[in-house]
Every structure is written in C-alpha cells, then in structure tokens.
Image (cartoon, helix red, strand yellow):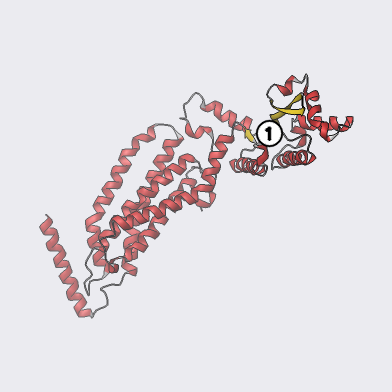
C-alpha cells in the first residue's frame, strides 16, 4: 500500500536544514511562485522568413507549446515573429522580400533587438542584409503544487522541442533543473533499483555461495525473495512515514539495497552449510544456524542503530530520511533473517526427514549430543 502511494517531489527545502535562514523563503517561493505559474523563456533559431514552409513549421512549434497541458495559451505568448507576419500580410510583402523586410520591421525596436543575434545574407553582388539568426520569446504555464504535473509540463515541452531539431530550441525556468532531476528519479528509480538488486544478487552468488554444491543451493531462492521483500517494505514504509520520491530518498534506497543483503545471506549460508543427515529434520539445522549467527546479527543491528542515533539531533530532511532508511532496513532485515527465513526453511526443506520413526529418534538424539559436544568445545 505504501509503495503505491509513493509520489515524486523535488522541493528545494529537501536539501536544507530546518533552521536555515533560507528555509522560510523557500517554502514561500514554493507555495506562492511556482504554484501560481510563471513565464518560460525559449531561445530558438530563426525560421527562414522567405520560405512559407519554414514559417508554417515554426508556427506549428509555437502552437504545440501553447497546447501543452497547463499552458495559459496564445494570449500569454510574447513573440515578435507573429507581429511581423501580420505586418507583412497587411502590406502585401512577397515571400522573396520577407528577409529584407524583417530588417526594416525591427529597425528602432530595441526591446526586441537587444538580445537578437544576426546572420549576414547576400541580396546582390554589392548588397547584404542582417537577418535574425537566433532570438528568444516567452509563453506562460499555470503552476501546480503537484510535482507530477510540473514534471509532465517539462517533459511535454522537451518532446515538442525534440520534434523540431532545426530550431535548436532551449528553454529556461527556475524550476526546470529541479523538475528534470525529479523526472529522472521518477522514471529511473525502478530501473536503478532493479539493476542494483541484480548486481547485488550476482555478487552474493559469487562471493558467498561459490563454495556450496548444487544440493545446498535451496536457500538461494529464499534469499532472493527475502531480499526483494525487504526493499519493498522499506520503500512502502518510507512513503507511509512521510518520505517522497526524490533524489535524497533514491540515494538512501540504493544504500539499503546493499545493506539488506547482509542479514539474509549470513543466515542462508550458515544454514546451507549444515550437514544433511538422514533422520535429522531441517528444524535441527535451523537451530544450529541460529545458534551460530543470531547473536552476531542482533549485535550488528544494535550497533548500527546506535551509530546513527546521534544523527537525529540534526533537523534536516536528508538526515531524517537517512535514519528512517537505516532503521527500516535493520528491523526488516533482522525479521527476515531470524524469523521469516528460518520458518521457510523448516516448512519447505524436507531433506533428511524421510526415514523410519525409530531411526529418526535415534539420529536426532545423536545430532543433539554432537551439537552439545561442539558447544562444550567452543566454551
């Protein structure tokens, strides 16, 4: 349930400490500025004014930008090219004269020409004109407090600009960098987590399970399932605990992927290395494995939580998310390794249990005596 409620967010306050002088201003900026909507600035190559096809394609580009979700529309666009085209129609300027006429139209328009770049075009053997090569314009989009909608706006604009590569369009708004980062975490989180899971499982197989033969690989399946379950529970409970899907949470989640493997692998490898003896059920092997690794697993979890508890004194979203991630992965990792995995091994691993009842009793007694002798030797 928690995993399904995970929502993207890239607020600037996520990377600030709570008592920062800029924190209050960032909250106001988020609520009153981005949420209300502002102008986006676009910089594009100039169309060929003497080519009607080029002008039509440029107008199509502008129309698509004005048709993006949450766009204010045509009335918000500040674009001198449309004024020039209306001017040319009113005065009956022919297509072949458009490039020459645009120079006349822009003469004295310092508000437009201030940021224009030009290219030189040869009209005749002794005549050249300056034609706009690159310019900027504005169009507005309504704001939203929902980062998903903001991400959709930016993604739609990117798709429109990619459909018109000849314009080499770029755009700018204060929230674009944050939204671009949010879109990365939004679309890449599952893929990145999946790749990390596969990489850790492969490394686990090479380092921890290379010494096991084929008959001892039963626990590997349950380690993989437990591994995925731990990370799913961490993601879900982080969401229920007030953590959004942002770059901070993504880093913490990638950390937990490598952290969660420690508990389950130690339990599984210790269990897999127990000798299978006819008449000795899996519960005996589980008990022997727990005798060996339960205390180290509990101690490691306690020491980890003790090490990070002081971080909670710093009032910061980043550190709170870090502590929450560590706490959840320790709790769920220990539950999986000390309760869930042993229960699965006892219920589903029937190796060594299918023998005659009398012999079963005798062999179980021998295994218990052997275990007691082993413990006495250790002491």
Is residue 185 rendered to the left or right of residue 198?
A: right
SS at badge 1 = strand
For the view shown, which residue lies furthest in the front direction? Answer: 125
Q: How many marks?
A: 1
Within 10 Å of the Cα at label 1, are there few (<14), some (14-19), or many (20+) other Cα atoms? some
Residue 357 lies, in percent from the top left, at 23, 79
Residue 184 left/right relative to 321:
right
Vertically, is 221 above or below 320?
Answer: below
| 324 or 223, nearer to the observer | 223
**Dot 1 corresponds to which residue?**
45
In this orientation, which residue lies closer to the viewer: 29 or 366? 29
Percent across and percent down for residue 83 are 80, 30
Asked if residue 327 is positioned above or below residue 44 in the image, the reply reads below
Identity of the residue drawn at 26% across and 74% down: 353
Asked whether 104 or 255 is in front, the reply is 104
Across and down, in percent, residue 376 comes to 11, 59
Of the 4 image quadrants, the one containing the C terminus is bottom left
Residue at the image point whose x is 14% and y is 67% from the top: 369
Q: Quadrant of residue 130?
A: top right
Residue drawn at x 53%, y 39% is: 181
Give left or right: position of 193 versus 63.
left
Query: Compared to 250, does 230 lie above or below?
Result: below
Residue drawn at (41%, 53%), measured in percent from left and top?
197
Res. 337 visible in picture: no
| Residue 266 point in image, percent of width and height | 28, 55
Instruction: Work out whether 165 lies above or below 223.
Output: above
């Amino acid at each position: 349930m928690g995993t399904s409620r995970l929502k993207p967010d890239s607020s600037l306050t996520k990377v600030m400490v709570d008592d920062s002088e800029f924190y209050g201003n960032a909250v106001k900026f988020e609520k009153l500025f981005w949420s209300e909507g502002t102008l986006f600035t676009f910089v594009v190559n100039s169309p060929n004014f003497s080519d009607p096809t080029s002008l039509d394609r440029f107008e199509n580009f502008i129309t698509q930008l004005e048709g993006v979700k949450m766009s204010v529309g045509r009335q918000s666009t500040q674009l001198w090219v449309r004024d020039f085209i209306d001017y040319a129609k009113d005065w009956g300027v022919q297509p072949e004269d458009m490039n020459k006429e645009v120079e006349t139209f822009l003469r004295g328009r310092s508000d437009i020409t201030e940021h224009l770049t030009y290219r030189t075009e040869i009209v005749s053997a002794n005549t050249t004109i300056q034609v706009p090569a690159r310019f900027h314009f504005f169009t507005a989009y309504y704001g939203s407090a929902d980062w998903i909608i903001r991400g959709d706006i930016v993604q739609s604009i990117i798709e429109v600009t990619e459909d018109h590569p000849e314009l080499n369009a770029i755009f700018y708004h204060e929230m674009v960098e944050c939204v671009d980062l949010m879109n990365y975490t939004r679309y890449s989180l599952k893929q990145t987590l999946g790749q990390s899971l596969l990489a850790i499982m492969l490394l686990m197989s090479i380092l921890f399970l290379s010494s096991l033969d084929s008959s001892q690989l039963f626990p590997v399946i349950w380690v993989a399932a437990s591994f995925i379950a731990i990370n799913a529970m961490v993601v879900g409970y982080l969401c229920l605990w007030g953590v959004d899907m942002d770059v901070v949470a993504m880093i913490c989640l990638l950390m937990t992927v490598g952290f969660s493997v420690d508990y389950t692998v130690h339990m599984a490898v210790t269990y897999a290395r127990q000798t299978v003896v006819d008449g000795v059920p899996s519960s005996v092997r589980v008990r022997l494995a727990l005798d060996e690794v339960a205390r180290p697993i509990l101690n490691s979890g306690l020491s980890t939580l003790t090490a990070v508890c002081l971080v909670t004194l710093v009032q910061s979203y980043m550190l709170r998310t870090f502590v929450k991630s560590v706490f959840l992965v320790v709790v769920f990792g220990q539950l999986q390794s000390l309760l869930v995995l042993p229960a699965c091994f006892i219920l589903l691993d029937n190796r060594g249990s299918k023998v005659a009842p009398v012999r079963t009793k005798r062999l179980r007694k021998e295994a218990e005596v052997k275990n007691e002798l082993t413990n006495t030797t250790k002491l």
